[in-house]
Protein backbone atom coordinates (compact mmCIF):
# COMPACT_ATOMS: atom_id res chain seq x y z
CA UNK A 1 0.00 0.00 0.00
CA UNK A 2 1.32 3.41 -0.92
CA UNK A 3 1.21 5.58 2.21
CA UNK A 4 1.41 8.93 0.37
CA UNK A 5 -1.64 8.01 -1.71
CA UNK A 6 -3.55 6.69 1.29
CA UNK A 7 -2.93 9.97 3.15
CA UNK A 8 -4.13 11.95 0.12
CA UNK A 9 -7.32 9.86 -0.05
CA UNK A 10 -7.90 10.41 3.67
CA UNK A 11 -7.35 14.14 3.36
CA UNK A 12 -9.07 14.95 0.08
CA UNK A 13 -11.27 12.02 -0.91
CA UNK A 14 -15.01 12.50 -0.53
CA UNK A 15 -17.24 9.53 0.22
CA UNK A 16 -20.42 10.15 -1.78
CA UNK A 17 -22.10 6.83 -0.97
CA UNK A 18 -21.25 3.29 0.17
CA UNK A 19 -19.81 2.63 -3.29
CA UNK A 20 -18.63 6.01 -4.60
CA UNK A 21 -15.35 7.67 -3.60
CA UNK A 22 -14.75 11.04 -5.23
CA UNK A 23 -11.09 11.92 -5.78
CA UNK A 24 -11.49 14.62 -8.39
CA UNK A 25 -9.29 17.05 -6.45
CA UNK A 26 -6.11 15.13 -7.27
CA UNK A 27 -6.77 12.26 -9.69
CA UNK A 28 -9.57 12.56 -12.18
CA UNK A 29 -10.46 16.20 -12.73
CA UNK A 30 -7.86 18.27 -10.95
CA UNK A 31 -4.56 16.37 -11.06
CA UNK A 32 -1.67 16.55 -8.59
CA UNK A 33 1.40 16.10 -10.83
CA UNK A 34 3.83 15.43 -7.94
CA UNK A 35 1.59 12.66 -6.63
CA UNK A 36 1.25 11.27 -10.18
CA UNK A 37 5.04 11.23 -10.43
CA UNK A 38 5.30 9.20 -7.23
CA UNK A 39 2.52 6.87 -8.43
CA UNK A 40 4.33 6.39 -11.74
CA UNK A 41 7.55 5.65 -9.85
CA UNK A 42 5.80 3.05 -7.71
CA UNK A 43 4.31 1.29 -10.76
CA UNK A 44 7.72 1.39 -12.47
CA UNK A 45 9.43 -0.16 -9.46
CA UNK A 46 6.85 -2.93 -9.12
CA UNK A 47 6.97 -3.89 -12.82
CA UNK A 48 10.58 -3.03 -13.69
CA UNK A 49 11.66 -6.66 -14.12
CA UNK A 50 8.77 -7.64 -16.38
CA UNK A 51 10.23 -6.39 -19.65
CA UNK A 52 7.38 -3.95 -20.27
CA UNK A 53 7.41 -2.48 -23.80
CA UNK A 54 4.16 -0.49 -23.72
CA UNK A 55 1.72 0.91 -21.20
CA UNK A 56 -1.93 0.60 -22.16
CA UNK A 57 -4.59 2.81 -20.55
CA UNK A 58 -7.92 4.48 -21.26
CA UNK A 59 -8.86 8.14 -21.58
CA UNK A 60 -9.01 10.37 -19.64
CA UNK A 61 -8.13 9.64 -16.03
CA UNK A 62 -5.69 6.83 -16.80
CA UNK A 63 -3.42 9.12 -18.82
CA UNK A 64 -1.61 11.05 -16.04
CA UNK A 65 -0.45 8.05 -13.96
CA UNK A 66 0.41 6.15 -17.16
CA UNK A 67 2.57 8.91 -18.60
CA UNK A 68 4.49 9.15 -15.32
CA UNK A 69 5.01 5.37 -15.25
CA UNK A 70 6.03 5.45 -18.92
CA UNK A 71 8.55 8.20 -18.17
CA UNK A 72 10.19 6.05 -15.53
CA UNK A 73 10.01 2.73 -17.43
CA UNK A 74 11.09 4.56 -20.60
CA UNK A 75 8.28 3.07 -22.72
CA UNK A 76 5.45 4.61 -24.79
CA UNK A 77 1.90 4.94 -23.47
CA UNK A 78 -1.14 4.15 -25.62
CA UNK A 79 -4.50 5.42 -24.48
CA UNK A 80 -7.63 3.73 -25.75
CA UNK A 81 -10.31 6.13 -26.90
CA UNK A 82 -13.94 5.79 -25.82
CA UNK A 83 -16.60 6.21 -28.43
CA UNK A 84 -20.27 5.47 -28.73
CA UNK A 85 -19.67 3.73 -32.04
CA UNK A 86 -16.74 3.16 -34.29
CA UNK A 87 -15.74 3.78 -37.86
CA UNK A 88 -12.59 2.46 -39.55
CA UNK A 89 -12.94 -0.82 -37.64
CA UNK A 90 -10.32 -2.54 -39.80
CA UNK A 91 -7.51 -0.40 -38.48
CA UNK A 92 -8.51 -0.80 -34.83
CA UNK A 93 -8.49 -3.27 -32.00
CA UNK A 94 -11.69 -2.59 -30.10
CA UNK A 95 -13.76 -3.85 -27.21
CA UNK A 96 -17.03 -2.93 -25.54
CA UNK A 97 -16.94 -1.60 -21.98
CA UNK A 98 -20.04 -1.23 -19.85
CA UNK A 99 -19.96 1.46 -17.18
CA UNK A 100 -22.08 0.62 -14.15
CA UNK A 101 -21.67 4.22 -12.92
CA UNK A 102 -22.92 5.81 -16.13
CA UNK A 103 -25.08 2.86 -17.14
CA UNK A 104 -23.88 3.00 -20.71
CA UNK A 105 -21.69 1.02 -23.06
CA UNK A 106 -18.74 2.51 -24.88
CA UNK A 107 -16.53 1.12 -27.57
CA UNK A 108 -12.89 1.48 -26.65
CA UNK A 109 -10.24 1.16 -29.30
CA UNK A 110 -6.61 1.56 -30.21
CA UNK A 111 -4.89 1.71 -33.55
CA UNK A 112 -3.43 -1.62 -34.69
CA UNK A 113 -0.21 0.20 -35.53
CA UNK A 114 0.82 0.53 -31.89
CA UNK A 115 0.51 -2.94 -30.41
CA UNK A 116 1.68 -6.33 -31.66
CA UNK A 117 2.77 -9.81 -30.60
CA UNK A 118 6.22 -8.63 -29.56
CA UNK A 119 4.80 -6.30 -26.94
CA UNK A 120 4.58 -6.89 -23.22
CA UNK A 121 2.00 -4.50 -21.78
CA UNK A 122 1.32 -3.02 -18.39
CA UNK A 123 -2.34 -1.98 -18.15
CA UNK A 124 -2.86 1.08 -15.94
CA UNK A 125 -6.07 2.71 -14.75
CA UNK A 126 -7.16 5.13 -12.04
CA UNK A 127 -9.88 2.90 -10.54
CA UNK A 128 -10.63 -0.81 -10.45
CA UNK A 129 -14.19 -1.58 -9.37
CA UNK A 130 -16.16 -4.12 -11.41
CA UNK A 131 -13.21 -4.43 -13.74
CA UNK A 132 -15.02 -3.69 -16.99
CA UNK A 133 -12.43 -1.23 -18.30
CA UNK A 134 -9.55 -3.51 -17.24
CA UNK A 135 -11.14 -6.50 -19.01
CA UNK A 136 -11.72 -4.39 -22.13
CA UNK A 137 -8.07 -3.29 -22.20
CA UNK A 138 -6.91 -6.89 -21.64
CA UNK A 139 -9.19 -7.96 -24.50
CA UNK A 140 -7.49 -5.42 -26.78
CA UNK A 141 -4.01 -6.62 -25.72
CA UNK A 142 -5.07 -10.22 -26.46
CA UNK A 143 -6.35 -9.27 -29.93
CA UNK A 144 -2.85 -7.94 -30.63
CA UNK A 145 -1.35 -11.17 -29.20
CA UNK A 146 0.62 -9.00 -26.79
CA UNK A 147 1.74 -10.40 -23.44
CA UNK A 148 0.01 -8.88 -20.40
CA UNK A 149 2.50 -8.34 -17.55
CA UNK A 150 -0.24 -7.19 -15.21
CA UNK A 151 -2.40 -4.33 -14.02
CA UNK A 152 -1.31 -1.18 -12.21
CA UNK A 153 -4.28 0.37 -10.42
CA UNK A 154 -4.26 3.60 -8.45
CA UNK A 155 -7.34 2.85 -6.31
CA UNK A 156 -9.00 -0.56 -6.12
CA UNK A 157 -12.45 -0.91 -4.61
CA UNK A 158 -11.83 -4.14 -2.75
CA UNK A 159 -15.54 -4.57 -2.01
CA UNK A 160 -16.30 -4.95 -5.72
CA UNK A 161 -15.30 -7.95 -7.82
CA UNK A 162 -12.92 -6.59 -10.47
CA UNK A 163 -9.66 -7.25 -8.65
CA UNK A 164 -10.75 -10.62 -7.32
CA UNK A 165 -11.76 -11.81 -10.80
CA UNK A 166 -8.55 -10.61 -12.47
CA UNK A 167 -6.42 -12.34 -9.81
CA UNK A 168 -8.50 -15.50 -10.15
CA UNK A 169 -7.71 -15.41 -13.88
CA UNK A 170 -4.01 -15.47 -12.95
CA UNK A 171 -3.20 -11.83 -13.60
CA UNK A 172 -0.85 -9.83 -11.42
CA UNK A 173 -2.78 -6.84 -10.06
CA UNK A 174 -0.84 -4.14 -8.22
CA UNK A 175 -3.19 -1.66 -6.56
CA UNK A 176 -1.56 1.26 -4.77
CA UNK A 177 -4.55 1.68 -2.46
CA UNK A 178 -7.24 -0.90 -1.77
CA UNK A 179 -10.43 0.48 -0.24
CA UNK A 180 -12.27 -2.29 1.56
CA UNK A 181 -15.25 -0.22 2.66
CA UNK A 182 -16.87 3.20 2.24
CA UNK A 183 -19.67 2.53 4.71
CA UNK A 184 -20.81 5.26 7.11
CA UNK A 185 -18.97 7.86 5.07
CA UNK A 186 -15.61 6.46 6.11
CA UNK A 187 -12.75 5.17 3.96
CA UNK A 188 -11.37 1.89 5.29
CA UNK A 189 -8.27 0.54 3.59
CA UNK A 190 -7.62 -3.19 3.28
CA UNK A 191 -4.37 -2.77 5.20
CA UNK A 192 -6.06 -1.02 8.18
CA UNK A 193 -8.67 -3.72 8.32
CA UNK A 194 -5.94 -6.37 8.51
CA UNK A 195 -4.25 -4.42 11.32
CA UNK A 196 -7.51 -4.17 13.26
CA UNK A 197 -7.98 -7.91 12.92
CA UNK A 198 -4.46 -8.40 14.25
CA UNK A 199 -3.22 -9.89 10.97
CA UNK B 1 10.84 26.62 -31.80
CA UNK B 2 11.63 23.43 -30.03
CA UNK B 3 14.07 21.45 -32.20
CA UNK B 4 13.40 18.07 -30.55
CA UNK B 5 9.67 18.39 -31.27
CA UNK B 6 10.26 19.61 -34.81
CA UNK B 7 12.47 16.58 -35.51
CA UNK B 8 9.81 14.27 -34.09
CA UNK B 9 7.15 15.85 -36.33
CA UNK B 10 9.44 15.46 -39.35
CA UNK B 11 10.16 11.83 -38.51
CA UNK B 12 6.77 10.58 -37.34
CA UNK B 13 4.11 13.11 -38.36
CA UNK B 14 1.83 12.11 -41.23
CA UNK B 15 0.35 14.76 -43.51
CA UNK B 16 -3.17 13.58 -44.28
CA UNK B 17 -4.25 16.66 -46.22
CA UNK B 18 -3.37 20.34 -46.64
CA UNK B 19 -4.87 20.99 -43.21
CA UNK B 20 -4.49 17.75 -41.23
CA UNK B 21 -1.27 16.64 -39.56
CA UNK B 22 -1.51 13.31 -37.78
CA UNK B 23 0.81 12.93 -34.78
CA UNK B 24 -0.91 10.05 -33.03
CA UNK B 25 2.35 8.09 -32.74
CA UNK B 26 3.71 10.40 -30.02
CA UNK B 27 1.13 12.99 -28.95
CA UNK B 28 -2.53 12.13 -29.11
CA UNK B 29 -3.01 8.38 -29.13
CA UNK B 30 0.36 6.82 -28.46
CA UNK B 31 2.31 9.17 -26.17
CA UNK B 32 6.07 9.56 -25.90
CA UNK B 33 6.58 10.31 -22.18
CA UNK B 34 10.20 11.51 -22.56
CA UNK B 35 9.15 13.99 -25.23
CA UNK B 36 6.23 15.10 -23.04
CA UNK B 37 8.70 15.66 -20.19
CA UNK B 38 10.82 17.92 -22.41
CA UNK B 39 7.71 19.74 -23.65
CA UNK B 40 6.58 20.29 -20.05
CA UNK B 41 10.04 21.60 -19.18
CA UNK B 42 9.94 24.02 -22.09
CA UNK B 43 6.51 25.37 -21.06
CA UNK B 44 7.70 25.65 -17.45
CA UNK B 45 10.78 27.64 -18.50
CA UNK B 46 8.83 30.00 -20.71
CA UNK B 47 6.18 30.74 -18.07
CA UNK B 48 8.21 30.36 -14.86
CA UNK B 49 8.15 34.08 -14.01
CA UNK B 50 4.40 34.49 -14.49
CA UNK B 51 3.29 33.28 -11.06
CA UNK B 52 1.23 30.42 -12.49
CA UNK B 53 -1.01 28.75 -9.86
CA UNK B 54 -2.95 26.32 -12.09
CA UNK B 55 -2.68 24.75 -15.51
CA UNK B 56 -5.93 24.46 -17.41
CA UNK B 57 -6.35 22.01 -20.28
CA UNK B 58 -8.92 19.83 -22.02
CA UNK B 59 -9.29 16.06 -22.22
CA UNK B 60 -7.72 13.95 -23.55
CA UNK B 61 -4.66 14.99 -25.56
CA UNK B 62 -3.91 18.08 -23.45
CA UNK B 63 -3.39 16.04 -20.30
CA UNK B 64 0.08 14.56 -20.90
CA UNK B 65 1.92 17.81 -21.74
CA UNK B 66 0.01 19.61 -18.97
CA UNK B 67 0.91 17.12 -16.27
CA UNK B 68 4.59 17.35 -17.23
CA UNK B 69 4.46 21.17 -17.15
CA UNK B 70 2.60 21.02 -13.81
CA UNK B 71 5.28 18.72 -12.42
CA UNK B 72 7.96 21.24 -13.27
CA UNK B 73 6.02 24.37 -12.25
CA UNK B 74 4.81 22.52 -9.14
CA UNK B 75 1.15 23.46 -9.69
CA UNK B 76 -2.06 21.41 -10.13
CA UNK B 77 -3.55 20.65 -13.53
CA UNK B 78 -7.29 20.86 -14.18
CA UNK B 79 -8.66 19.18 -17.28
CA UNK B 80 -11.98 20.34 -18.66
CA UNK B 81 -14.32 17.53 -19.57
CA UNK B 82 -16.15 17.39 -22.90
CA UNK B 83 -19.77 16.43 -22.90
CA UNK B 84 -22.65 16.62 -25.30
CA UNK B 85 -24.81 18.25 -22.64
CA UNK B 86 -24.40 19.11 -19.01
CA UNK B 87 -26.13 18.41 -15.74
CA UNK B 88 -25.31 20.08 -12.39
CA UNK B 89 -24.71 23.38 -14.21
CA UNK B 90 -24.65 25.32 -10.93
CA UNK B 91 -21.44 23.71 -9.79
CA UNK B 92 -19.64 24.15 -13.10
CA UNK B 93 -17.99 26.76 -15.26
CA UNK B 94 -18.78 25.74 -18.80
CA UNK B 95 -18.39 26.87 -22.37
CA UNK B 96 -19.35 25.59 -25.81
CA UNK B 97 -16.60 24.50 -28.18
CA UNK B 98 -17.22 23.82 -31.84
CA UNK B 99 -14.91 21.34 -33.54
CA UNK B 100 -14.39 22.04 -37.24
CA UNK B 101 -12.72 18.63 -37.62
CA UNK B 102 -15.60 16.68 -36.12
CA UNK B 103 -18.27 19.21 -37.10
CA UNK B 104 -19.92 19.04 -33.70
CA UNK B 105 -20.31 21.16 -30.59
CA UNK B 106 -19.30 19.99 -27.15
CA UNK B 107 -19.85 21.52 -23.77
CA UNK B 108 -16.60 21.75 -21.86
CA UNK B 109 -16.68 22.28 -18.12
CA UNK B 110 -14.71 22.36 -14.91
CA UNK B 111 -15.84 22.25 -11.31
CA UNK B 112 -16.10 25.71 -9.68
CA UNK B 113 -14.16 24.32 -6.72
CA UNK B 114 -10.85 24.34 -8.56
CA UNK B 115 -10.54 27.81 -10.05
CA UNK B 116 -11.08 31.26 -8.53
CA UNK B 117 -10.08 34.94 -8.74
CA UNK B 118 -6.78 34.33 -6.99
CA UNK B 119 -5.60 31.96 -9.71
CA UNK B 120 -3.23 32.73 -12.54
CA UNK B 121 -3.66 30.10 -15.22
CA UNK B 122 -1.55 28.74 -18.02
CA UNK B 123 -3.78 27.20 -20.69
CA UNK B 124 -2.15 24.24 -22.44
CA UNK B 125 -3.33 22.22 -25.43
CA UNK B 126 -1.84 19.84 -27.98
CA UNK B 127 -3.00 21.74 -31.08
CA UNK B 128 -4.01 25.29 -31.91
CA UNK B 129 -5.84 25.60 -35.22
CA UNK B 130 -9.00 27.70 -35.31
CA UNK B 131 -8.63 28.31 -31.59
CA UNK B 132 -12.07 27.12 -30.52
CA UNK B 133 -10.82 24.99 -27.60
CA UNK B 134 -8.41 27.71 -26.48
CA UNK B 135 -11.17 30.33 -26.52
CA UNK B 136 -13.48 27.98 -24.58
CA UNK B 137 -10.82 27.42 -21.91
CA UNK B 138 -10.14 31.16 -21.70
CA UNK B 139 -13.90 31.72 -21.34
CA UNK B 140 -13.93 29.33 -18.37
CA UNK B 141 -10.95 31.08 -16.76
CA UNK B 142 -12.71 34.43 -17.20
CA UNK B 143 -15.90 33.10 -15.58
CA UNK B 144 -13.76 32.25 -12.54
CA UNK B 145 -12.17 35.73 -12.69
CA UNK B 146 -8.79 34.03 -12.89
CA UNK B 147 -5.88 35.79 -14.56
CA UNK B 148 -4.72 34.22 -17.85
CA UNK B 149 -0.90 34.21 -18.10
CA UNK B 150 -1.01 32.81 -21.60
CA UNK B 151 -1.26 29.75 -23.81
CA UNK B 152 1.21 26.92 -24.15
CA UNK B 153 0.62 25.05 -27.40
CA UNK B 154 2.49 21.98 -28.59
CA UNK B 155 1.73 22.42 -32.33
CA UNK B 156 0.21 25.54 -33.83
CA UNK B 157 -1.19 25.48 -37.33
CA UNK B 158 0.07 28.86 -38.39
CA UNK B 159 -2.05 28.78 -41.55
CA UNK B 160 -5.24 28.84 -39.49
CA UNK B 161 -6.45 31.83 -37.48
CA UNK B 162 -6.45 30.67 -33.83
CA UNK B 163 -3.00 31.90 -32.87
CA UNK B 164 -3.31 35.16 -34.79
CA UNK B 165 -6.62 35.98 -33.12
CA UNK B 166 -5.39 35.17 -29.60
CA UNK B 167 -2.28 37.32 -30.09
CA UNK B 168 -4.43 40.14 -31.50
CA UNK B 169 -6.47 39.94 -28.29
CA UNK B 170 -3.25 40.58 -26.35
CA UNK B 171 -2.61 37.06 -25.12
CA UNK B 172 0.84 35.57 -24.89
CA UNK B 173 0.88 32.41 -27.04
CA UNK B 174 3.92 30.14 -26.82
CA UNK B 175 3.81 27.45 -29.50
CA UNK B 176 6.62 24.90 -29.46
CA UNK B 177 6.20 24.18 -33.17
CA UNK B 178 4.44 26.38 -35.70
CA UNK B 179 3.50 24.66 -38.93
CA UNK B 180 3.08 27.23 -41.67
CA UNK B 181 2.06 24.82 -44.41
CA UNK B 182 1.13 21.20 -45.07
CA UNK B 183 0.80 21.61 -48.81
CA UNK B 184 2.09 18.88 -51.15
CA UNK B 185 2.32 16.45 -48.25
CA UNK B 186 5.19 18.40 -46.71
CA UNK B 187 5.49 19.94 -43.26
CA UNK B 188 6.92 23.45 -43.44
CA UNK B 189 7.68 25.14 -40.13
CA UNK B 190 7.37 28.89 -39.69
CA UNK B 191 11.06 29.09 -38.78
CA UNK B 192 12.19 27.31 -41.96
CA UNK B 193 10.07 29.61 -44.04
CA UNK B 194 11.72 32.62 -42.44
CA UNK B 195 15.14 31.13 -43.15
CA UNK B 196 14.24 30.56 -46.78
CA UNK B 197 13.13 34.16 -47.07
CA UNK B 198 16.43 35.23 -45.55
CA UNK B 199 14.82 36.62 -42.40
Image (cartoon, coloured by chain):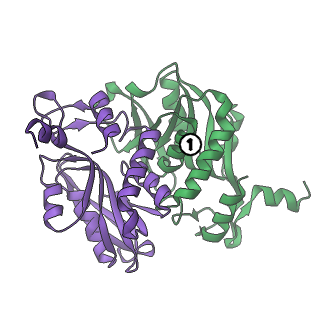
Chain colours: A purple, B green
Q: Secondary structure at mark 1?
A: helix
Disc 1: CA contacts within 10 A as few (<14), some (14-19) or many (>=20): many
Q: Is residue B130 visible?
A: no
Q: How many marks?
A: 1
Q: Residue furthest front?
A: A198
Q: Nearer the viewer, residue A119 or A177?
A: A177
Q: Quadrant of residue B122?
A: top right
Q: Note whether residue B94 is visible.
A: yes
At horizontal 46% and vertical 51% (from top left) the residue drawn is A68
Location of residue A79 (image quadrant): bottom left
Q: Which residue bears the numbered disc 1?
A: B69
| B119 horizontally vs A158: left or right | right
Of all chains, the one bearing label 1 is B
User: Which residue sits at x=29%, y=37%?
Assistant: A6
Q: Quadrant of residue A35?
A: top left
Give the vertical position of A80 relative to B1 (above or below): below
Apparent side of residue A138 relative to residue B66 in the rendered image (left or right) = left
Depth order, front residue of B98/B39: B39
Estimate the x, y position of residue A52 in percent, counting from the top left. Answer: 40, 68
Query: Foreground residue, A176 or B80?
Result: A176
| Left or right relative to A38: residue A18 | left
Give how far across and how far down residue A49 sits, in percent: 38, 67
In the image, taking residue B164 as reference, residue A167 lies left or right, namely left
The residue most toward the left is A197
Residue in the picture at 34% in, 76% down: A146
Residue B119: % across, % down? 53, 24
Amino acid sequence: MMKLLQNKINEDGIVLSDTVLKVDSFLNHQIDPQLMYEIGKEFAERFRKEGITKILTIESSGIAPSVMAGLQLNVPVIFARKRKSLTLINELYSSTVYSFTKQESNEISISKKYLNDEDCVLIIDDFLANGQAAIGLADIAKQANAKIAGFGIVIEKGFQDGGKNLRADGYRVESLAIVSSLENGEVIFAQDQMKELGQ
